[in-house]
Image: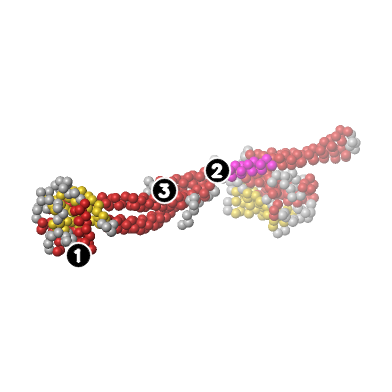
Amino acid sequence: MKLKPHSIRFKFFSAISLVALMFIGILLLLNLFFYQDYFMMTRKSSLCDAFDTVCGSYDGDMDDIVTLLDSYESRSAIRLAVAMDDGTVLTSSFLHDRGDHAAPDFEFGMNEQQFRSIAVLASVMQNEDWSSLAEHQYRFANISLRDNDQYLCLIGSLDKDEGRYLIAYMPFAFIEQNSSLNLVFLLIAGGCALLICLGIAFFFSREFTRPLVSMAALADRMSELDFSTQYTGKGRRESDEVEQLGQSLNRLSAYLEQAIGELKESNDQLAQEVREKERIDNMRREFIVNVSHELKTPIALIQGYAEGLTAGVADDPEDRKFYCDTIADEAGHMNRLVMQLLSLSKLELGAEQTFYEEIDLHEMCRDAVQKTAVLCESKNLSVDCADTHITVRTDSGLLEQVLMNYLSNAIRYTAEGGSIVISAVRNGGRTRLTVFNAGEGLPEDELPKIWEKFYRTDRARTREAGGTGIGLSLVRAIADTLHGDCGAENVPGGIAFWFDIPDAPPQTE
């Protein structure tokens, strides 16, 4: 784990390390400045315990005292001696193995420890006044030998009547050595403890900050509107504040994802509605332009020929008849356009009433061919409707408009001497009526556009062909009204327009 200077892991690790370092430093300072005083106090307490123990066991018998002094020194490293008020040493823990209780005269057989003990006793007897001590009272003294060897001594009254005193002492070198060893050990232990604390701090800083780092990454993703990541945690108790914070972030992420999703959906719907409104507005403007364009030419012709008749330009009866016939044709064209527009509007608004009845398709197709026979003969076209012997149940008026539109377009766009074929096929619950006309067909990208209002593949031939440009739009509106379908497709030799007639619901009494 890499610790960055300003990361929470680094701060957590630094805080724990600093506390551990301060704690160990305080221990070192306490040991350095107060340990020796504390140890001196405990040593004085040990001397007092030794004095109390000897006083409690003393009954005037010096033989028992010798054994007690020996066992006590072996246990506590405190040297003990019993002396008279005149300085005579009756017994001591370091001379009892000689077998007598005489005064400690110097002999060549003494070791250094015994020699120093005699020197300490001599210094005490020479420099201390014992007579002021009451029964079982004691006092402390610091004895320094010529080689600067120092001792802590306790002089206490053992038997005031007999003039016997107990001397208990220990060397300062032992005290100082113990203090030095303790300081060295504390330094070693403190260093080891510091390393252990650093390791623990490293571990805990990683473990305790890992959820926070994970939640910070989760918050960053949420700020980028990425809600795919969730806080998983480590199975902590529900009372753990960190775990509760992580779960709160998960809930917040879910709420934000839902809210933003709903907002996006609303925005998409609003954008779609705006686009639809713009499309409708464009269609309305285009519709007005197209209607104006379609009406402009016949109105101009009617106005021009009417003014000519008024001005007496056509004096000849044939000229007047030509003028009147032209006015009637243009008025008829305007009437057909207006009627188709009204019919289309009623169909799109759902205001057109439908009347279902049984219809013989062959008879309807034959009537349509008869109505357009003059147009077909003028272009020498052949029309075949032999494959239409099917009965359907639908609205005859609307179906007749579809058939007449298809047949009129076929006659209009079929080359002279060409052929037109009308057929019908039953397929499940639908009947498909198809009108085929020979020709070149249409480009594939224009096939979906021909159902739009006033769309023409060749605008230059519009007036010439006599179409209004809304016939196929009317067919599509009729298909929606009858819950059917319509379409066109290029086939070998020409193009075919089809219309699916669904079975109407049966008539109810």
Gap in Å between the C-alphas at discs 1 and 3? 77 Å
Give the mark nearer the N terminus: 2 vs 1. 1
Q: Label 1 belongs to which residue?
A: 110
Q: Residue at x 49, y 52 (%)?
A: 5
Residue 68 in sight from this viewpoint: no
Confirm whether the magenta stretch covers residue 376.
Answer: no
Residue 475, compared with residue 170, is above or below; it is above
Whether tag 2 and tag 1 are in contact, CB under 8 A, the answer is no
Circle 3 or circle 2, nearest the eye = 3
Q: Residue at x 79, y 52 (%)?
A: 379
**Tag of residue 243:** 3
Three-letter amino acid code at the position of disc 2: Leu
Front-most of 126 and 310? Answer: 126
Circle 1 or circle 3, nearest the eye = 1
Circle 2 or circle 1, nearest the eye = 1
Gap in Å between the C-alphas at discs 2 and 1? 105 Å
Q: Residue furthest bottom?
A: 109
Q: Residue at x 20, y 59 (%)?
A: 118
Task: Using a 10 Å C-alpha cutoff, classify the residue at mark 1 as few (fewer than 14 neighbours), some (14 to 19) or many (20 or more).
Answer: few
Q: Label 2 belongs to which residue?
A: 263
105 with respect to 410 (left or right) = left
Three-letter amino acid code at the position of disc 1: Met
